[in-house]
Amino acid sequence: MGGLRGELDAAGITDEFLRASYQCARELNAAHGRTYYLATLLLPRWKRPHVHALYGFARYADEIVDDLDSTLSDPQKAQWLRQWGGDFLAALASGEPGGFPGEPGGVPGAEATVLPAVLHTIRRFDLPAGHFEAFLASMAMDLTVTGYATWDDLMVYIHGSAVVIGLQMLPILEPTHAAAEPYARDLGVAFQLANFLRDVGEDLRRGRVYLPQASLDLFGVTRERLATGVVDGPVRRLLAHEIARARELFRSARPGIRLLHPTSRDCVLTAFRLYSGILDEIEQADYQILDRRVSVGLGRRLGVAVPGLVRAAHSRRASRHHGAGPRRQSRSRPPR
């Protein structure tokens, strides 16, 4: 808790209700977003609570869709998501600071205090409400859509599930040029594709496939073939094809890291290396991912993060020397 207190103090967050909400978001990030959380530690302390808040928002919605009590049907989950999302958007549109009326409780792994921190972060950085509307729309798609015919169809889902998250993060990372935005979009898509590939088997058991049907057809792979768990030649070629697509997006996104504030670059570079490392792990596992979940090992994660921590500390010292600091002024006008 001492670390969190220091982060909240650095961010100028003094209200005890808000501090408790940010604590909840940080706990969600630490428990469920190992790579994301590790990268967050490379940011200046004042930025970290806001990243925790945005992660907590996304994780809470994901809990409703995927991890809520299994006795609930998809229509019941959809109703829960509509209530939760509708109350959130209404609170956001009101422009009023403080609590979050009507938030349903009982989601495993998430407390009902997450969203005040999210609202505070949105107002502080003047984040467009449309980013959050798009995210909620993609989460709702998970309850009704089980596959996507083409890459363009899949991109409709990815826009809300990943692209807008990159755009939410961008103001906190302090871009030095407006040209950073398209790179943030590409990086969000690359992260999402890496996750899709890592989770092919797990998602299939939930009845979903996040690889375009056009790609499956190209290599003669069916859902039934994937469900056997056997990684044969066609499945290997399918996965190699999608890994190549993801790698191209990572290559396209990397130059954008230089367009961020120096104190944010090591955080994003660390996340970049760890998420792209998922692709390496899939290849090293000989594509055997239909019945297991590969991950970047602790040794590699530390090998990437520790040098990044050293560089990030140097960047923060240099930034303080040049007089840079946190944006402490909260904004409370209604979102665009």
Image (cartoon, rainbow, N blue to C red):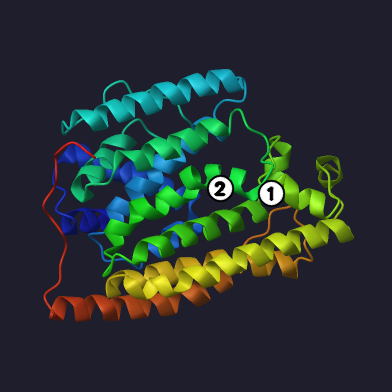
Residue 143, image x, y percentages: 59, 29
Local SS, label 2: helix
Q: Quadrant of residue 282?
A: bottom right
**Which residue is located at x 51 percent, y 35 percent?**
139
**Which residue is located at x 16 percent, y 49 percent?**
13
Q: Nearer the viewer, residue 155 or 28?
A: 155
**Which residue is located at x 59 percent, y 68 percent?**
248
Q: Nearer the viewer, residue 92 or 10?
A: 92
Q: CA distance from mark 2 to mark 1?
A: 11 Å
Q: Quadrant of residue 266?
A: bottom left
**Which residue is located at x 41 percent, y 67 percent?**
268
Badge 2 amino acid? Met
Badge 1 amino acid? Leu
Q: Nearer the viewer, residue 185 or 174?
A: 185
Q: Is residue 300 left or right of residue 111?
A: right
Q: Quadrant of residue 57?
A: top left
Position of the C terminus, as image quadrant, is top left
Residue 254, image x, y percentages: 47, 72
Residue 160, image x, y percentages: 47, 43
Residue 201, image x, y percentages: 73, 47
Q: Is residue 258 left or right of residue 117?
A: right
Badge 2 or badge 1: first in the primary sequence? 2
Q: For mark 1, does the 10 Å Cα neighbourhood hold few (<14), some (14 to 19), or many (20 or more) residues?
A: many
Q: Nearer the viewer, mark 2 or mark 1?
A: 2
Residue linked to disc 2? 155
Q: For mark 2, does the 10 Å Cα neighbourhood hold few (<14), some (14 to 19), or many (20 or more) residues?
A: some
Question: Can the viewer see residue 291 in this picture?
Answer: no
Question: Can the viewer see residue 209 in this picture?
Answer: yes
Q: Is residue 217 left or right of residue 275?
A: right
Residue linked to disc 1? 211
Q: Nearer the viewer, residue 300 or 60?
A: 60
Local SS, label 1: loop
